Image: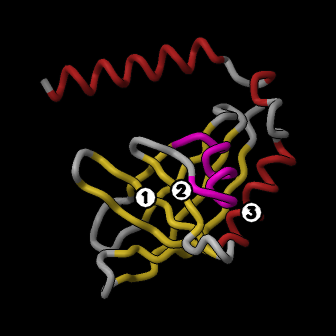
Amino acid sequence: MRESVQAEVMMSFLVSEELSFRIPVELRYETADPYAVRLTFHLPGDAPVTWAFGRELLIDGVGGPCGDGDVRIAPADSEQLHEVLIKLQVGSDQAVFRASVAPLVAFLDRTDKLVPLGQERALADFDAHLDEALDRILTEEQSAG
């Protein structure tokens, strides 16, 4: 049985130090892919963009800096843990979003009630997900090359 948890959170898209604007971001967690969360960003004038990354990365990022590579999450202020920065990078392009911690923690709490942290393997068809991910990577590499 496929179950999910969804929430909509308003985040600030930080275009520069002087310019930012608020956008709705849909957070989604599904038992079909119990290790990942998906964030769908609804930028004005653009098609929605979805990023998927580890649920544990989001959990860890609420309390301290974490991640390397394409997704990095860290508290906006090391003294106060009220907001986090989510940095998404593709090549040299980077997008930075600022979000309040409270709605993220509420969402993560709901995901934990659905699938407790550490119990994901009981639901995951790891081999099928690995095959799907490898197929996507190979397709992307073939289309880029």
Kind of residue sitting beneath label 1? Lys
Query: What residue range appears in magenta?
Result: 53-65
Corner quadrant of residue 49: bottom left
Q: Is residue 102 left or right of residue 10?
A: right
User: Circle 1: is it few (<14), some (14-19), or many (20+) Cα within 10 Å?
Assistant: some
Residue situated furthest bottom in the rendering: 18
Corner quadrant of residue 27: bottom right
Q: Please give the residue where the numbered disc 1 appears in the rendered image.
A: 87
Front residue of this view, candidates 137 and 83: 83
Q: Please give the residue where the numbered disc 2 appears in the rendered image.
A: 73
Q: Position of residue 13 (x, y in %)?
A: 40, 73
Q: Mark 1 or 3 closer to N-term?
A: 1
Classify 33 as above or below 37.
above
Is the Cβ of the residue at disc 1 closer than 8 Å to that at disc 3? no
Q: Is residue 75 left or right of residue 112?
A: left
Front residue of this view, candidates 42 and 88: 88
Cα separation, mark 2 vs mark 3, equals 14 Å
Q: Is residue 43 magenta?
A: no
Q: Position of residue 80 (x, y in %)?
A: 68, 77
Identify which residue is drawn at 67% across, 41% down: 30
Is the Cβ of the residue at disc 1 closer than 8 Å to that at disc 2? yes
